[in-house]
């Protein structure tokens, strides 16, 4: 590791302050993304980082409020390194703010190593294929769109939908079936959240006992927008420490990544950058990739890092830049449905537009159950047929449908009410039993995704001895 440059100090160079951005006259040689300490005449040290550099000026992103800064008396220090996060073995069970400072009244974090919050460069050749199944307790995910260890699988929500409740439920139940409980950890990051939501996250994880195996980062809506840009990076740095230093399997849940992107748009606008789609900066794709691509498995390392980012779609628009670009970078998406939520279905997961591209690598024989892939495929096909029958019924009326179409409509109603809807977390085995019961209500000739042996073993006994 190269030695740090001697501390540089700049006094009297501050020219103006625009929101969270401090503009300085350039009098020192510093680099992009370097850490900064801004000291006002009140003696308070405010953390920041270099956001832009040109021949005449420096732009510093302040991570804390600028109230009380007197520009002529402001002193700016440059330690000569990027922002680092000091981590140690006592990080689990802690509640931290968006930049890793304790909020739980406990002592400072013990530090055994300091890691760059931007992550270290990873040779793509060192990546291993994500494998193995992570059970979330949500049937629509575990059975139909399985989460695989090392995957990045976003959840697309919208305003007013219960994504926070789903995030807490997953954090409380998630487990890696092939590993001991002490080998699995959760890093939970709330980005730009309200005070009551932050308290809900904290109390829910405490009450469920999940906080003991978790690290909770809380960035509030009232915090500086520039701090919002760093919260996912601090959370992922803690996850990388737990995964690649301590050798744990880590699931990172981040909500809401749309708040992160809106903060990025705000800061880019303050810098005077030329906007692209919907006012977001043109580098939104690469910026999101720098976060999402920190998930994965590294060959030769025992730990893994899995991501479940949650984002809200403005105006329920899945083509909005945030979900659109996230879908390109990640390996699928879990989509929530407003119509299911209005119907009282919880969790309101719409399985038809949902997809897990790595499901085939973490399910089936040796991972979950040999019949799991075929069962999921048959459920998807039957529910898609039910959706078609519903559309046809709107045109010709249910009386004009065939007996098969009416049976599929009844299947679709039961699918949503009995399989998708759940009041408690389910194991995969419980989800599969419920699914076999549902398929037993369909004619045996319609079960084209199942083998004759699977029909005889699972469907016939539930259908009175013969597949109807």
Image: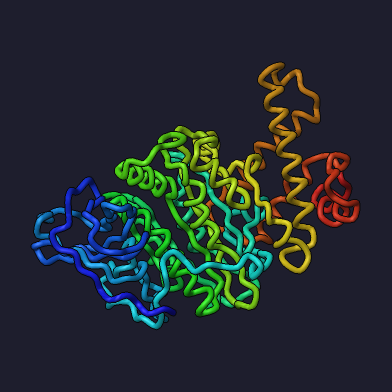
Return the residue found at the far bottom.
112
Identity of the residue drawn at 25% across and 74% down: 7
- Left or right of 32? Residue 223 is left
* Residue 263, above or below 363: above
Residue 319: horizontal and vertical position, in percent?
54, 35
Tell me the colour scheme of the image: rainbow
Q: Quadrant of residue 97?
A: bottom left
- Left or right of 109? Residue 318 is right
Q: Is residue 188 visible?
A: yes
Identity of the residue drawn at 41% across and 78% down: 2
Is 455 or 332 nearer to us in this picture?
332
* Residue 297, above or below 190: below
Residue 322: horizontal and vertical position, in percent?
49, 42
Quarter that holds the N terminus:
bottom left
Identity of the residue drawn at 47% across and 69% down: 239
Is 326 or 375 nearer to us in this picture?
326
Residue 53: horizontal and vertical position, in percent?
33, 54
- Left or right of 136? Residue 409 is right
* Residue 73, above or below 462: below
- Left or right of 414? Residue 400 is right
Residue 342: horizontal and vertical position, in percent?
49, 35
Q: Is residue 347 visible?
A: no
Give the total of numbered labels.
0
Is 206 or 265 nearer to us in this picture?
265
């Amino acid at each position: 590791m190269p030695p740090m440059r001697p501390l540089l100090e700049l006094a009297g160079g501050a020219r103006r302050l625009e929101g969270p951005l401090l503009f300085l006259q350039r009098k020192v040689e510093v680099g992009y993304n370097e850490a900064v300490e801004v000291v006002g005449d009140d003696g308070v040290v405010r953390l920041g980082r270099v956001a832009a550099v040109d021949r005449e000026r420096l732009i510093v992103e302040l991570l804390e409020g600028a109230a009380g800064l007197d520009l002529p008396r402001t002193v700016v220090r440059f330690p000569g390194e990027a922002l680092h996060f000091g981590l140690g073995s006592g990080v689990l069970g802690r509640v931290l703010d968006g930049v890793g400072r304790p909020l739980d009244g406990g002592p400072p974090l013990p530090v055994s190593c300091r890691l760059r919050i931007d992550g270290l460069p990873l040779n793509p050749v060192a990546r291993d294929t994500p494998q193995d199944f992570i059970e979330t307790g949500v049937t629509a995910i575990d059975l139909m769109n399985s989460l695989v260890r090392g995957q990045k699988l976003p959840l697309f929500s919208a305003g007013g939908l219960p994504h926070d409740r789903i995030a807490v439920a997953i954090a409380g139940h998630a487990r890696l079936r092939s590993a001991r409980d002490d080998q699995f950890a959760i890093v939970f990051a709330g980005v730009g959240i309200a005070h009551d939501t932050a308290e809900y996250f904290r109390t829910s994880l405490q009450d469920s006992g999940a906080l003991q195996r978790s690290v909770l980062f809380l960035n509030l809506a009232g915090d500086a927008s520039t701090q919002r840009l760093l919260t996912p990076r601090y959370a992922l740095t803690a996850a990388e420490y737990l995964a690649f230093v301590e050798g744990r399997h880590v699931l990172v849940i981040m909500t809401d990544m749309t708040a992160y992107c809106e903060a990025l748009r705000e800061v880019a606008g303050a810098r005077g950058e030329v906007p692209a789609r919907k006012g977001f900066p043109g580098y939104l794709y690469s910026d999101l990739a720098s976060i999402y691509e920190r998930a994965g498995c590294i060959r030769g390392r025992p730990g893994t890092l899995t991501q479940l980012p949650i984002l809200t779609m403005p105006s329920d628009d899945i083509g909005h830049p945030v979900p659109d670009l996230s879908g390109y970078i990640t390996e699928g998406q879990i989509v929530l449905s407003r119509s299911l939520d209005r119907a009282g279905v919880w969790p309101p997961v719409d399985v038809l537009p949902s997809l897990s591209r790595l499901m085939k690598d973490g399910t089936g024989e040796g991972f979950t159950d040999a019949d799991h892939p075929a069962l999921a495929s048959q459920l998807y096909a039957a529910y898609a047929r039910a959706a078609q029958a519903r559309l046809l019924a709107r045109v010709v009326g249910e009386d004009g449908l065939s007996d098969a179409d009416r049976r599929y409509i009844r299947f679709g109603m039961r699918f949503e009410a009995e399989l998708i809807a759940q009041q408690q977390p389910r194991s995969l085995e419980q989800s599969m039993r419920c699914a076999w019961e549902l398929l037993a209500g369909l004619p045996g000739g319609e079960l084209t995704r199942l083998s004759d042996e699977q029909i005889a073993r699972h469907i016939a006994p539930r259908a009175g001895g013969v597949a109807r």
